[in-house]
Image (tube, grey):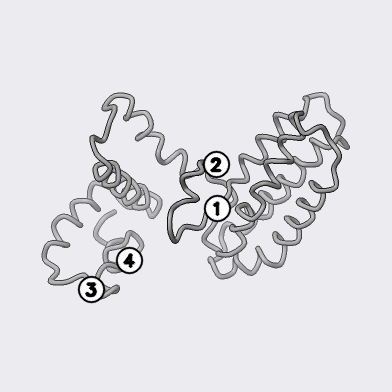
């Protein structure tokens, strides 16, 4: 977990449970017994992802209720289990447990909002194009350039996730936004977000 993120103001980190799963997976031999500690750690993760998958069609408010009711107790059990294990710190299993406990509060952030998810895999796949591209264009030349790239990419990927044609959406913004007299009111910008009814009607 990149330490620089922890220095950003007004930022709350959300830990990725796929990373926890991966560390326990790497610590568990293929022939390991089902009752082995590594398998147990994987089982906890599987239960969490299974619960989340079963809530896919729920609203954010409903998901939050489910998180507090079902997911929170399961996480508490998992972290208590981690604390009660006696394994070599330098072993793969020891490192998996240490990693989970080190960022425990970060992994629990998902319990604070129904819009959050256990895994960051979706976001990582969304920026794959940028990661591949930067090997060709190498640099953003400046901090502001990198910041602008991040904003535009985030906006376009959010548009895709909301079922929009990203090119139509970008064109819509470039044509409509300059005609607004002021952005002081929150409602003005909200009308241009990918999930607004007007945008949904014009940019698919």
Q: Residue at x 29, y 53 (%)?
A: 204
* Viewer-proximal residue among 40 and 164: 40
Question: With respect to residue 9, does 185 lie above or below?
Answer: below
Residue at image coords 38%, 32%: 131
Q: Earlier in the sequence, mark 4 or mark 3?
A: 3
The relative height of residue 32 versus residue 151 in the rendered view (above or below) is: above
Taking 32 as reference, is 135 left or right?
A: left
Q: Secondary structure at mark 3?
A: loop
Quarter of the figure with residue 93: top right
Q: Which mark is residue 14?
A: 1
Q: Nearer the viewer, mark 4 or mark 2?
A: 2
Residue 39 image point, x, y percent? 80, 36
For label 1, the SS is loop
Residue under numbered circle 2: 1
Helix, strand or loop at label 4? It is loop
Q: Position of residue 185 (x, y in %)?
A: 25, 75
In this view, the mark in front (2 or 3):
2
CA separation in Å, label 3 and label 1: 30 Å
**Alpha carbon of mark 4 to alpha carbon of mark 2: how far?**
34 Å
Which residue is identified by label 4? 196
Dot 4 or dot 2: first in sequence order is 2
Determine which residue is flagged by label 3.
184
Disc on the earlier residue, 1 or 4: 1
CA distance for labels 2 and 3: 36 Å
Q: How many marks?
A: 4
């Amino acid at each position: 977990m990149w330490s620089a993120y922890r220095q950003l103001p007004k930022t709350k980190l959300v830990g990725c449970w796929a990373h926890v799963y991966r560390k326990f997976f790497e610590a568990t031999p293929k022939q390991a017994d089902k009752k082995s500690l590594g398998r147990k750690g994987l089982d906890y993760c599987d239960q969490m992802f299974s619960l989340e998958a079963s809530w896919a069609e729920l609203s954010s408010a409903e998901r939050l209720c489910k998180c507090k009711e079902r997911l929170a107790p399961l996480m508490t059990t998992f972290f208590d289990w981690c604390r009660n294990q006696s394994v070599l710190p330098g072993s793969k299993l020891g490192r998996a447990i240490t990693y989970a406990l080190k960022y425990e509060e970060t992994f629990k952030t998902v319990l604070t909002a129904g819009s959050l998810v256990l895994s960051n895999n979706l976001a990582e796949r969304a920026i794959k194009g940028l990661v591949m591209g930067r090997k060709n264009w190498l640099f953003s030349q400046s901090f502001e350039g990198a910041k602008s790239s991040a904003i535009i990419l985030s906006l376009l990927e959010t548009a895709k996730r909301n079922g929009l044609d990203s090119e139509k959406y970008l064109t819509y913004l470039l044509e409509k936004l300059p005609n607004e007299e002021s952005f002081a009111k929150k409602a003005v910008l909200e009308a241009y977000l990918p999930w607004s009814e007007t945008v949904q009607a014009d940019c698919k």
